[in-house]
Image (tube, rainbow, N blue to C red):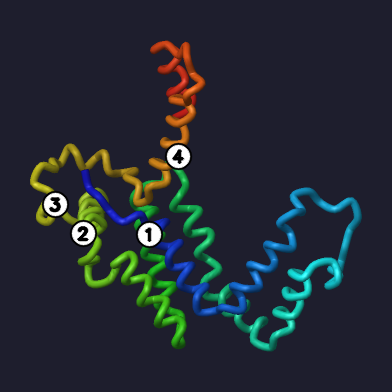
Amino acid sequence: MIHITCIAHGLHKLAENIRSHFPRVDKLVAKGKQVFLKAPSPSPRCYTTFDSNDAVSIKESQTLLNKISMESNLTFIHLNYGFLLSTITKLESQGVSLTDSVSTVMFTKNKLEEVAGDVGMKVNTKFNQVLAVRFLLEKNDGFAIILNILKILNGKSSSMNGLPEDLTRNDLTFYKYAPVTSTDIERSFSRYKTILADNRRSFDVENIKKNISCAMQ
């Protein structure tokens, strides 16, 4: 078994780091959540504006939106880091091949390196610290092994150097759809929690087999 840092969790940490560089945008998002916190259903009437007298959060949100730097900050975030949302969603999907997963990680790495300026450099440094994808991922040894396996699967290498000694060539075939996130494990936890609930008193072995088969599809 090869242990690697969960890429999705690493990107979530990266997003938190990006947020820390824009405190006003962070505050705007927090106040915006307060505005819609108690509005799970659409309003019966269509509103095109919000009255600042309705809630303090609306007034504070409007004040933040009127800040001169707000528009430029939102533009910078969307232009340079807006792709992270779809990247995380793709990595968390089921049935993604190892080739696609690694390509997504490397695409993210290249996109972050293209961002100029002080914030771009700091975010890129954080990315390297969290995921250690620099200098052959020396801190994330598991992912470095995954890269070596991928080279063999894609026919770019035939050397087994750097791989665990107990790993055979036949074992490598099972890594075609190896996950680089722990999302599937977290999904299985919730499924097993339902199966092993305290209120289940007459769950025989045959029904457990059927339940697991349905849950894992």
Which mark is on residue 187? 4
Can residue 200 be seen? yes
Q: Secondary structure at mark 2?
A: helix
Instruction: Name the residue nearer the viewer: 26 or 156.
Output: 26
**In this rendering, the label closer to the viewer, 2 or 4:** 4
Spatial CA distance of label 2 from label 4 is: 25 Å
Q: Earlier in the sequence, mark 2 or mark 3?
A: 2
Q: Position of residue 175 (x, y in %)?
A: 27, 43
Q: Earlier in the sequence, mark 3 or mark 4?
A: 3
Q: Quadrant of residue 101?
A: bottom left
Q: Earlier in the sequence, mark 3 or mark 1?
A: 1
Which mark is on residue 111? none
Spatial CA distance of label 2 from label 3 is: 10 Å
Name the residue: 47% across, 26% down: 197
Please state if 150 lies on the left or on the right of 195 as rendered: left
Q: Report the residue marked by disc 3.
A: 163
Spatial CA distance of label 1 from label 4 is: 24 Å
Q: Earlier in the sequence, mark 2 or mark 1?
A: 1
Q: Secondary structure at mark 1?
A: helix
Which mark is on residue 103? 1
Q: Earlier in the sequence, mark 2 or mark 4?
A: 2
Q: Secondary structure at mark 4?
A: helix
Spatial CA distance of label 2 from label 1 is: 18 Å
Name the residue: 50% across, 53% down: 89
Few, some or many residues within 10 Å of mark 2 (<14, 14–19, 20+):
some
Name the residue: 71% across, 56% down: 37
Few, some or many residues within 10 Å of mark 1 (<14, 14–19, 20+):
few
Q: Report the residue marked by disc 2.
A: 141
Q: Earlier in the sequence, mark 1 or mark 4?
A: 1
Mark 1 belongs to which amino acid?
Ser
